[in-house]
Image (cartoon, coloured by chain):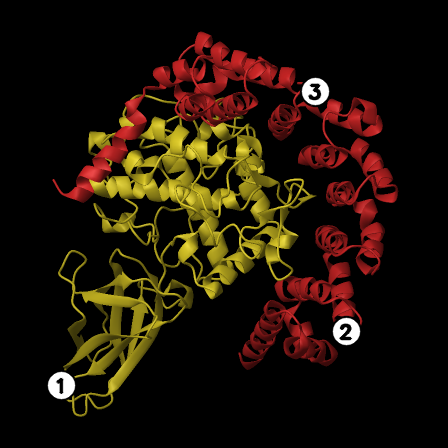
Chain colours: A yellow, B red
Amino acid sequence: MKVELQINNTTNANGRFVGWSPSPCRIRITDPTGATTQTVVVKLSAVSTATGGAVVFRKTAAGTSSTTLDLSLPINGASVPFFVVGRKASISNGDVSIQARAQIANSPIVGVIRLMVRIRKNAESLTTAERDRFLAAFASLNTSGRFQDFRDMHTLLSQPQAHGAKGFLPWHRSYLLDLEREIQTIDPSVALPYWRFDQPGPKLFTLDFMGVAGPTGTVQWSATNPMQFWATDSALGVTRSPMAGWTPTTQPGPGVITEAATFALGTTYVAFRFPMELNPHGQAHTRWFGFIRSVPTAAKDPLFFLLHCNVDRLWAKWQRINGRFDPAVAASYDSAPANPGHNLPDTMWPWNGITNATDPTRPPTAPGGGMASSPCTTAPGTQPRVQQTLDYRGTISAASRLAFDYDDA
Amino acid sequence: MTTKKRASKKAAKAPKGMSALAALSVATNAKKTTAERVSALAQAPEAVMKSDENLQKLCDVVKNTDEPVEVRLEAINALATAAFAVATFEPYRNDYIATLQEVAVDPNQEIRESALGLLASEKNKFAQKKLLDGLKNPAKALVPPEKALQLLSYDVHTEAYAVARDIISNSPNELAKQEAMRLLAADPNSTKLFEKLLRDKDETREVRQVAASALNSLAPQKLQEHAREMLLDDSEYEDIQATSLSAVKQFGDDEEVAKDKALLKSVNRLSADAKSSKYKKSAKDFLAMVAEKEEK
């Protein structure tokens, strides 16, 4: 007897990634040889390596989790749904497996599928292999030319779409997700890491990771680091040096407020968003000299994406603390009228392709096309709306799950 | 309330302990200590966007050469932080740029570099002209040549190429040479120059590494050819071989590499004999990657 297991309801190997939210899965009998009844009970269990990820099972998305799950499968090949939830983050692709054992004589293993609990982690906690996979994939995206679209999305002309207004957090959540999905087409095991700017970065700010400022403030990399080939706007390298008196490997960003202070800015989105956009967000940017210090050039620096991953993580944690996933709850967002692209039902530039040819509030071009798709979820589609970014975990509606999670959120 | 919750509440109150307006008041008060003013500036950006008057108070601190440099630098940063809130900051933008332009010629070099850095990122023509003038006539230079070249590379114009080429052939210092090379990495006519610099063993490792990166931008296939040759060259420096291997590993044609027995033999030698354990590991990882792809 044999069964087929599908993670995220897909046979695509690049869809075998789960997070903390329930991932829809299914199982069906593909070869009923040995079955003596019209249905066969199959027991699912997870097998992990010592350092691998861990998952649990649910019969329904909102049901209780268990370490094993018995499912009754018809021998006619019809699929039976179940859900998988990550419990511990993986460190490599396929480091956790789901085994299916038929509850017949000798309990044979009738199906196995390897998967990964793919989670955005603190850059300081990555293993060397995780770090190197991230750098290799990011460098490849840069050299392929595709990264230039992301760089072009974040310039001074385009920034009224994304800064200084209520769409700041939703826009950047979409931006990171788009970039991460592009990186995952190169290496699906990679999730964006984040820079905890309120803590020192002893591993991050090294020659082997995000580089170290040379005498002129040009970032230097080790000879084995693929970021040494980084280029944007046809110009080579990255300019970034810490402000005088700050040692990023041993000190947090000076004047950058702590995580606790960020959460205490307010319990409503209106109270939370603008202060946090300035500090910690803006303050973390301006602790440096170089590209990252200014909107028009910030996205030329790969560190920008780790900084914003932490900004997004802070929003995610704030959402969880205050229960702000539901767009229908007033405190989850800001209902004051604003320019297109900032209101809950609005589609966001550039993914919607709208330029100032038809809407004077939009930029002259819309680089990059639609939002990258994911084999793990259909959300948010090619033209994300502001409201779709709030319920990123699928807490309110399972169909909203954007298939990313943070290690501590 | 638990200890953890109390601690969190106490820490959380810190930024609210001083309103943005109060922070601006402290930041602009010359009677306060430098440390107090620098600390307050972290909370001042919000106040800057409340009125023209507030913005001017901070701009005055930036422009006042009698103020402590630490306070002036942090005041520039506070303005830069406020500028991140693009839509809200828009009404104050012209005054911000005018202030930066004024202090771009400040007597203090740190202030000049800070302002010129922000202006360069905005592709500011005033700053670009000042930087280029300084390279052509060092008596007019506001910053060292290497810094000027670096900032000009934020928005490369062909006018800067000629100056950069001159600096490479007649470098005032090694850093200026490297920055000139970075700037020329956008110039298709510089491919041969980078090939020459990459293969010249008398050049510094830094120059050769920059040449490799520049070549990857301008003519990636050329870099692959040189990288292969440098990996086969027993007399080549280990760190240059490591950079070469990174290029092949990252951007090479997997099928071609797998068939290249001579190359694999050289990498195998690097994996066994390299003095640096990091280079050894890199070579081993590469061979493992090739073997894995072969298996598939």
Is residue A5 left or right of B280 when viewed as pictured?
Answer: left
Q: Which image quarter: residue A56?
A: bottom left
Work out whether B37 lies above or below A79: above
- Residue kind at label 3, given as amino acid type: Phe
The answer to whether mark 2 and mark 1 are in CB contact below 8 A is: no
Q: Position of residue B204 (x, y in %)?
A: 78, 55
Q: Chain of mark 1?
A: A
Q: Residues within 10 Å of mark 3 (few under 14, many from 20)?
A: few
Is residue A290 left or right of A177 when viewed as pictured?
Answer: right
| Residue appearing at x 48%, y 32% in the figure | A354
- The mark that comes first in sequence, 2 or 3, is 3
Q: Residues within 10 Å of mark 2 (few under 14, many from 20)?
A: some
Look at discs 2 and 1 and give the one toward the viewer: 2
Q: Is residue B226 visible?
A: yes
Q: Position of residue A64 (x, y in %)?
A: 13, 61
- Residue kind at label 1, given as amino acid type: Thr
Give the labeled residue for mark 2.
Answer: B232
- Out of B253 and B117, give the one closest to the viewer: B117
Which numbered disc covers residue A37? 1
Distance between mark 2 and mark 3 Cα atoms = 49 Å
- Residue kind at label 2, given as amino acid type: Leu
Q: Chain of mark 3?
A: B
Secondary element at tag 1: loop
Work out whether A72 lies above or below B137: below
Secondary element at tag 3: helix
Give the labeled residue for mark 3.
Answer: B126
